Amino acid sequence: MDTSQKTINPWLIAIAVMFATFLEVLDTTIVNVSLPHIAGSLSATPEEATWALTSYLVANAIVLPLTGWLASFFGRKRLLTLAVTGFTATSFLCGLAPTLPFLVVCRLLQGLTGGVLQPMSQAIMLEAFPPEKRGRAMAFWALGIVVAPILGPVLGGWLTDNYSWRWVFYVNIPIGVISVFMTRAFIFDPPYLKDVKRKVDGIGIGLLALGIGALQFMLDKGQTEDWFDSNLIRALAVASASALILFVIHALVAKDPVLDLRVLKDRTYATGVFMMTVLGFVLFGSLVMIPLFLQTVLGYPAIQAGIAMAPRGIGSFLAMPLIGYLMGKLDPRKMIVAGLTIGGVTLYMLSSINLSAGYWDFFWPQIIQGSAMGLLFIPLSTMSMASIPREKMGNATSLFNLMRNLGAGIGIAFVATSVSRSTTVHSTILAERLNPYSAQSQAAVNGARSMFVAGGSDWNTATVQAYGVLNGVIHRQAAMIAFIDIVRLLAIIFIVAIPLVFIMKRPSGAATPPPGAH
């Protein structure tokens, strides 16, 4: 081991990689609220502007599972330095973009450079700390994962409203510069990685890129293309399924695959990967659904909807230090069970709101739920990696983060589709049960018609407007019922996942630190 590695304080390493993680995760959500402004500024339609999101997500999904292989091929320090530098440079170019095609290309490059940051940072940090201290380290690192997606919409909305949409990209530059300097100063390749010689697995890279890229593109565009009624979505589904099946076969028979799936033979790791996929599904599904409900049903402006989501990040922020401390004292499996239970209960609490709900009705369930996310994320990540050999850590973190991101993509697609279709179904049911001759219906129509007549409309126009108001009331009620149905389903998913925890082995707190630890 290099003497320089021995003298590096592991918390400096944790700070360096947390900056990189925060940078990448923040950018997955900060751009969303700026899309209408981007479209208007670059003379594009809102649908065309979504390519600024899609290009980033697809590129990010393709490169993420390749991280472990890239690290062993180029070296961790060199790869992380290049990735952060590339991400910062492309952020600057995105802010300068004069046209939408230029922005989309820059976002594609930004996704390619950003995809390696999460798994690479996690692998470096897990090796920097001995097993008995990894809980606290993971609590610190997890702040970037949990808080950044919630901070993103708030910060993005504020920057866009007060300055320009270009600042949602420029804000990355100072963070990126600090991360580059800290990476060069404090990150070193362990000796075992320097001795690794990897061949280029061209077949595996091609199949994985095609399969993951087509799947991410399908998830992102499925709702707008009406899913399998679209020839494009059907073609993407066939391409993704075929490529991924062939990749699995190739990875199991190849001597040196780009992503080694044999690591899934470890039952604790395999269970952890599955549960992290579920966590991504529920967490990001609810993260999209609640702002959607606040804006479309309760009429919140985008920035206010983002602020209403802030308590979840506050809860995580407050709970992380305590959870990191408890990791060395409690059975992590009990903490995961507590997190799933609390998460399920708080989701059920959210299902009890109505159209008269105010800010505080969302505040308390979410701040408690934020604490539950810490109880889930930290013990689950730490336990899953506890028995992974140091030379396979990069490969394991790549697969782990890939499945969390795919779970998130599936959760977002599921929620968007379910909200739309469930609202339509409930609207039809409510409309069929509405009796236009009942006293309540007549009173509602007469009251609205009188208001429009007083506003200057003639009788016939006011009547049409009054029935439009009644139709709007039906739609809001239907959207409210759809929200309740889906939130309760997400709560049930958390509760049903509890028995899986006991498949995992309890890690030994007295384990010997890996030789590659700093």
Image: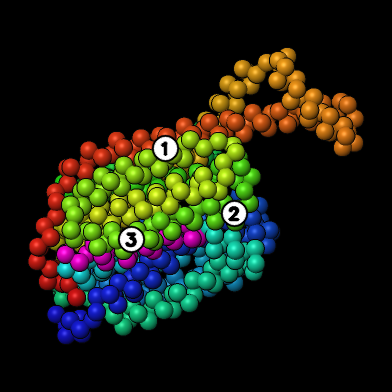
- Could you tell me the amino acid type at mark 2? Gln
**Above/below status of 514 relative to 311:** below
Residue at the spot of label 1 = 348
Q: Is residue 400 above or below residue 124?
A: above
Q: Earlier in the sequence, mark 3 or mark 1?
A: 3
Q: Element at badge 1?
A: helix
Q: Amino acid at mark 3?
A: Met
The residue labelled by disc 2 is 304
Q: Position of residue 55 (x, y in %)?
A: 49, 56
In this view, 116 is above or below 86: above
Q: What amino acid type is highlighted by mark number 1?
A: Tyr
Residue 153 visible? The answer is yes
Question: How many residues crowd around disc 2 within 10 Å: few (fewer than 14), some, or many (20 or more)?
Answer: some
Taken as a whole, is the magenta stretch helix, strand or loop?
helix
Q: Residues within 10 Å of mark 1 (few under 14, many from 20)?
A: many
- What range of the chain is rendered magenta? 131-152
Marks 3/2: CA–CA distance: 26 Å
Pointer 1 or 2: first along the chain = 2
Res 126 → quadrant: bottom left
In contact (CB < 8 Å): disc 3 and disc 1: no
Return the x and y of residue 211 as percentages of the image width and height.
36, 48
**Label 2: which secondary element:** helix
Question: Looking at the picture, how far across and down is residue 231, in whole percent?
Answer: 50, 36
> Which element type, helix, strand or loop, lies under badge 3?
helix
Please identify the quadrant where the N terminus is shown: bottom left
- Residue at 20% across / 70% down in the picture? 129
Quadrant of the rendered image containing residue 11: bottom left
Is residue 124 on the magenta stretch? no
Residue 142 pos. (x, y %):
34, 61
Q: How is the image coloured?
A: rainbow
Q: CA distance from mark 3 to mark 1?
A: 23 Å
